[in-house]
Image (cartoon, rainbow, N blue to C red):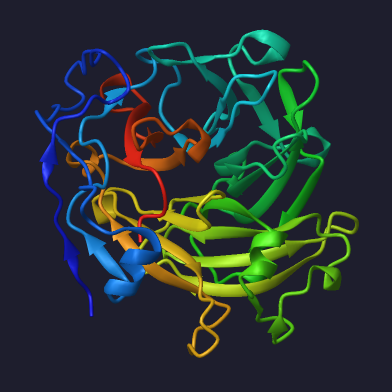
């Protein structure tokens, strides 16, 4: 059974004292839709309704604000990662741009996300394939251990050979001051995936830590057994999930960091026609898959089934479908990131979308979402 949840309307601030001018980018609703505290959530909700279910409205602030200065990037900003603050550093919003191929390092200055100027980041760092060649059509990015120096980028082709598919995961070292980053490793997945047009392939990537996968009883389809990290001795400390734009299918991989090989360990549908970005909420154990304007910006939420009696035990299963705030539903949003639970205030944490089309000169828009698991 699928149910639709309707929430009451409450007026609430959206994390800033006043909204900046949208300059024609969108209209701002007069009210903010938030889940009522009377509506059961988390385990209580799961016990009272059948999953999955569909939210009728965005479960957070309906007001969104532009979050970068006008024309900061140009078009084609396609993926986001929110790195939490720590004792010595501010939170970082990482953004990837597919053409020109760049990573941008951003911090919140109180009103917008601004580029970090130090260590060569002032205009973003250009990306290359291993050996300093080519220009990856970089569509998504993810971090593993927040204390490390690695960034993983997913690309669907080389912009210097646009008609040839090259579905790859690329690893970069973020240290140093050079304005160009050469990939330290590439896992070319093209031959392991169905044939896609060169500009219709991999768009999103997220990292799934081993403790979560093992603790939830994840089923390894390659070995037809519960996932055992020791079976992949050079894979690091987790698995990577990538999403395909044109089919909406998600693939989970173990990447060998010594010989550059890989093993596909799971395949499942995002339950939408397209998947353009992936975000793993490490606090709540939820994988988010974003669809762009082809699906009115809807997102599907997954976790691993832990009921040993379920036919889907150990597999990723759909738990909820969430629409964006109304102002964003027709935008070509190809990136999505969220702040950690540690930054919750008044049951809200920040979320950021990136608009690949840079509507009215703005790529980033910021809003809020209810803290905690949404199902």
Name the foreground residue: 31 vs 329: 31
User: In what quadrant of the picture does the N terminus appear?
Assistant: bottom left
Q: Give the number of marks.
A: 0
Q: Quadrant of the C terminus?
A: bottom left
Task: Tell me if residue 272 can be seen.
Answer: no
Q: Work out whether residue 284 can be spotted.
A: yes
Residue 241 point in image, percent of width and height: 59, 60
Left or right: where 221 falls relative to 340: right
Residue 291 spot, x, y in % from top left: 35, 53
Q: Is residue 204 left or right of residue 255?
A: left
- In the image: residue 320, left or right of residue 125: left
- Picture quarter containing residue 132? top right
Give whichever of 225, 168 is nearer the camera: 225
Residue at (74, 83) in percent of width and height: 223
x then y, percent, for residue 369: 33, 40
- The residue closer to the viewer here, 17 or 95, is 17
109 relative to 250, above or below? above
Q: Is residue 270 above or below residue 295?
A: below
Q: Quadrant of residue 2?
A: bottom left
Closer to us: 147 or 354: 147
Q: Residue at x 35, y 69 (%)?
A: 46
Residue 90 place in picture, x, y as percent: 60, 19
């Amino acid at each position: 059974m699928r149910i639709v949840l309707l929430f009451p309307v409450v007026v609430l601030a959206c994390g800033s004292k006043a909204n900046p001018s949208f300059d024609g980018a969108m209209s701002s609703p007069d009210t903010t839709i938030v889940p009522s505290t009377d509506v059961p959530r988390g385990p209580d909700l799961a016990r009272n309704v059948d999953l999955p279910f569909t939210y009728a409205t965005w479960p957070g602030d309906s007001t969104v604000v532009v979050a970068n200065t006008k024309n900061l990037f140009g078009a084609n900003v396609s993926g986001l990662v929110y790195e939490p603050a720590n004792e010595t550093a501010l939170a970082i919003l990482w953004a990837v741009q597919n053409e020109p191929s760049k990573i941008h390092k951003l911090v919140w200055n109180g009103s917008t996300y601004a580029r970090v100027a130090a260590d060569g980041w002032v205009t973003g760092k250009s990306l290359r394939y291993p050996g300093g060649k080519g220009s990856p059509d970089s569509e998504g990015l993810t971090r593993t251990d927040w204390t490390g120096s690695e960034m993983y980028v997913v690309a669907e082709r080389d912009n210097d050979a646009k008609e040839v598919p090259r579905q790859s995961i690329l690893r970069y070292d973020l240290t140093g001051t050079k304005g160009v980053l050469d990939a330290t490793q590439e896992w070319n997945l093209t031959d392991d995936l169905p044939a896609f047009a060169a500009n219709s392939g991999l768009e999103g990537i997220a990292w799934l830590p081993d403790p979560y996968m093992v603790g939830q009883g994840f089923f390894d389809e390659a070995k037809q057994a519960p996932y055992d990290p020791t079976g992949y001795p050079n894979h690091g400390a987790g698995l990577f999930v990538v999403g395909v734009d044109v089919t909406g299918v998600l693939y989970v991989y173990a990447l060998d960091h010594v010989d550059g090989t890989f093993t596909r360990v799971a395949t499942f549908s995002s339950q939408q026609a397209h998947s353009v970005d992936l975000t793993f909420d490490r606090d709540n154990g939820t994988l988010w898959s974003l669809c762009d304007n082809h699906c009115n910006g809807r997102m599907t939420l997954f976790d691993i089934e832990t009921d040993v009696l379920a036919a889907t035990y150990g597999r990723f299963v759909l738990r909820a479908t969430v629409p964006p705030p109304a102002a964003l539903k027709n935008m070509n949003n190809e990136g999505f990131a969220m702040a950690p639970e540690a930054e919750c205030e008044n049951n809200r944490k920040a979320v950021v979308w990136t608009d690949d089309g840079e509507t009215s000169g703005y790529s980033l828009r910021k809003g809020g979402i209810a803290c905690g698991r949404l199902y």
